[in-house]
Amino acid sequence: MDFLAAARGLLPGGSTVRVGVTGLARAGKTALLTSLAANLLAAGAGLPTLPALTARLAERRFRVAVAPSGASGLPRFDYAAHVAALAADPPRWPERTDAVSLLALDLEIGWPGMAASLPARRVRLEFLDYPGEWLLDFPLLAQDFSQWSAAALRRLDGRPEGRDFLAFAHGLPASAPPDDALADAGHRLYVETLQRLRAANLSFLQPGRFLMPAPGPPPPWQSFFPLTGGAPLAGLLRDRYDRYRASVRADLVAPGFGSVDRLVVLADLLSALHAGAEAFADAAASLRAVAKALRWQGGAPVWLAALAPWWFGGIGRVAFAATKADHVAARQRGNLAALVGSLTDVPDAPSRAFAVAAVRCTEDLVWTLEGRPVSAVRGRVAGEARGGRSYPGEVPDGPPGPDFWAHPFLALPDFEPMRLALGGRGGVPHIALDTLLTFLLEDVL
Ligand SMILES: Nc1nc2c(ncn2[C@@H]2O[C@H](COP(=O)(O)OP(=O)(O)OP(=O)(O)O)[C@@H](O)[C@H]2O)c(=O)[nH]1
Ligand SMILES: [Mg+2]
């Protein structure tokens, strides 16, 4: 694998490494891609923005440029707009994004020592911004309509967010006809339910495309909802569910996506801890489901690897990363990485857990609280003139037990990004992006 990757880089056209970056809405995908690009470009200009990575390169030549889009059919990641937002005065966070986009960088990596005069290797590094909601559709491929419906309805049982939808579904007579208007009405109520559950900080919400639709007008077969029993309407919903799954499968093998060689799964676990036991359990369940879908790669069900070779066939490395780690003090970040690791074990692929901050907004400080030193962070809270200190509390190093939830946990202020030098050309302050990149690209370097 290492040899092959290196050998491909010797060819005149160079090699391409494609990294999928995924995570649920607000997990931090856009911030991460923007910061990776800014810091790689700055490192290519000789600045020490990614120390762990450049240490691997020793004294070799290293150049980085944003690649031209060529004939690619995928929308481009709008790097210029995102970095301009971070570099503005006052700094702004990048806008929300949806659907898939691609960021491509061209790397030139020279040879060490005596070989330094040989032509440099060229590697195209492609990052694919992929909605995590869509990843949560993979488990549906292994569930038929009645299994999915039973599970989805069970989940809503007794929840206020699902009251209107459940009243509708339970009110349908056994003779309900396969009627478009009925299907549409139920679908609308079900989507509203999912939106309310998301607002209540839940994250294991399926089908993912109901919350993060593919671009373009919604196809009629997307209008379905979970329903048990033998009404003729259920037959129509089953057909539509099957069509939905066929489309998930087709997306997976669409040539535009090509093959993903590496995957980064981002999770905002600090917000989940902050939101409480139920939100955390749900976030943990979605991460486990994703890790489980990846586990299928090497073993059963093999059919999934055959159907979706680009996701499941060739992923060489998987990084699971807890984001926004600048909210907690240095000593807590090891625990945060351990917490992600405890939820995501992928035996068949080299995988590692990280705690990262793509855009570091704080600095560490030691604070004396009731006469005792505690490690805390300090940063500027959005809308406030002065910097504030924050002591967010202890991060557990594994799924927390009932004791943990007895105390309110973690203040998570809305920090403003630090001011950037040179309009972003000096890089973006971060935590551990260099170790993350070094893990992903070890064999390429
Ligand atoms: N403190 C801190 N906050 C961050 C960091 N990264 C992201 N955030 C916060 O999280 C928000 C969401 O980040 P995005 O990068 O837009 O997340 P996304 O996954 O692209 O979200 P969608 O485009 O909505 O799917 C940002 O607007 C920031 O408020 C970070 O490294 N540190
Ligand atoms: Mg985004």
Image (spheres, grey):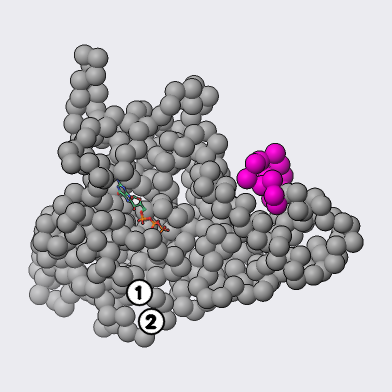
Whether ligand 2 has any atom under 8 Å from the Cβ at mark 2 is answered as no
Residue 203 appears in the figure? no
**Residue 76, numbered label:** 1
**Residue 194, numbered label:** none
Neighbour tally class for label 2: few under 14, some 14-19, many 20 plus, Cα within 10 Å: few
Secondary structure under badge 1? loop
- Which corner quadrant of the image does residue 392 belong to? top left
Residue 69 appears in the figure? yes
* Residue under the image location 57 percent in, 49 percent down: 196
Q: Residue furthest bottom?
A: 71
Image position, residue 301 (x, y; %): 64, 59
| Magenta-drawn segment | 151-165
- Which corner quadrant of the image does residue 388 belong to? top left
Image position, residue 159 (x, y; %): 66, 41
As drawn, 375 above or below 421 = above
* Residue under the image location 79 percent in, 70 percent down: 179
Q: Which residue is mark 2?
A: 72
Q: Split into 4 quadrants, where in the image is the C terminus?
A: bottom left
Secondary structure under badge 2? loop
